[in-house]
Image: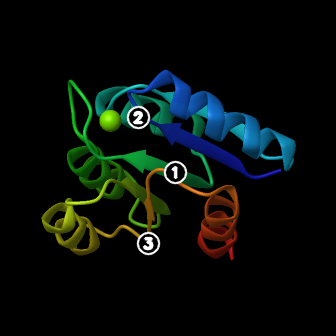
Amino acid sequence: MPKILIVDDAQFMRMRCGKLLEKYGYEVVEAENGRQAVERYRECRPDAVLMDITMPEMDGLEALREIRKMDPAARVAMLTALGQQGVVIEAIKAGAKDFIVKPFEQERVLESLRKLLS
Ligand SMILES: [Mg+2]
């Protein structure tokens, strides 16, 4: 099954998202900030990444750039909040494939993963 890296500094978000993905048979790997996301990506080579933007240590935009530098084919969807349009534009330039607005609906997350993995 596809391996998905969930990156968010909020534990409840990782848990909620992780439970959903496991229910649909995905393998889940987690990271709690951008720096850890880059490390996990290097170790695990996930098939897709769901990436929060605002995080301590390293934010999602910087982590996206690092991951795409390491793997130009990396498939990353950003988890965004309302009012982050500026960051969204930067993330598109940096190669993000999709955007999921929080609080997310389960179907939206599954749809995004199908799109990323197709
Ligand atoms: Mg956050």
Tell me the amino acid under the disc marked 3.
Lys
Q: Can residue 11 be seen here?
A: yes
Residue drawn at (69%, 77%) of the image: 118
Q: In the drawing, what numbered circle is on residue 94? A: none
Q: Earlier in the sequence, mark 1 or mark 2?
A: 2
Badge 3, how many Cα within 10 Å: few under 14, some, many 20+? some
Q: Residue furthest left?
A: 86
The quarter of the rendering in which ligand 1 is drawn is top left
How far, Cα to Cα, is label 1 from label 2?
9 Å
Q: Is residue 60 above or below residue 32?
A: below
> Picture coordinates of residue 54 (x, y %)?
25, 40
Kindly identify which residue carries mark 3.
Answer: 97
Q: Is residue 78 left or right of residue 113?
A: left
Residue 31 percent coordinates (x, y): 47, 28
State the SS at label 1. Answer: strand
- How many residues crowd around disc 1 within 10 Å: few (fewer than 14), some, or many (20 or more)? many
On screen, residue 98 above or below 35: below
Q: Is residue 108 above or below residue 19?
A: below
Q: Which residue is identified by label 2?
A: 37
Classify mark 3: helix, strand or loop: loop
Instruction: Name which residue type carries label 1.
Output: Val
Circles 1 and 2, Cβ within 8 Å, touching? The answer is yes
Residue 33 as seen in the image, left or right of residue 19: left
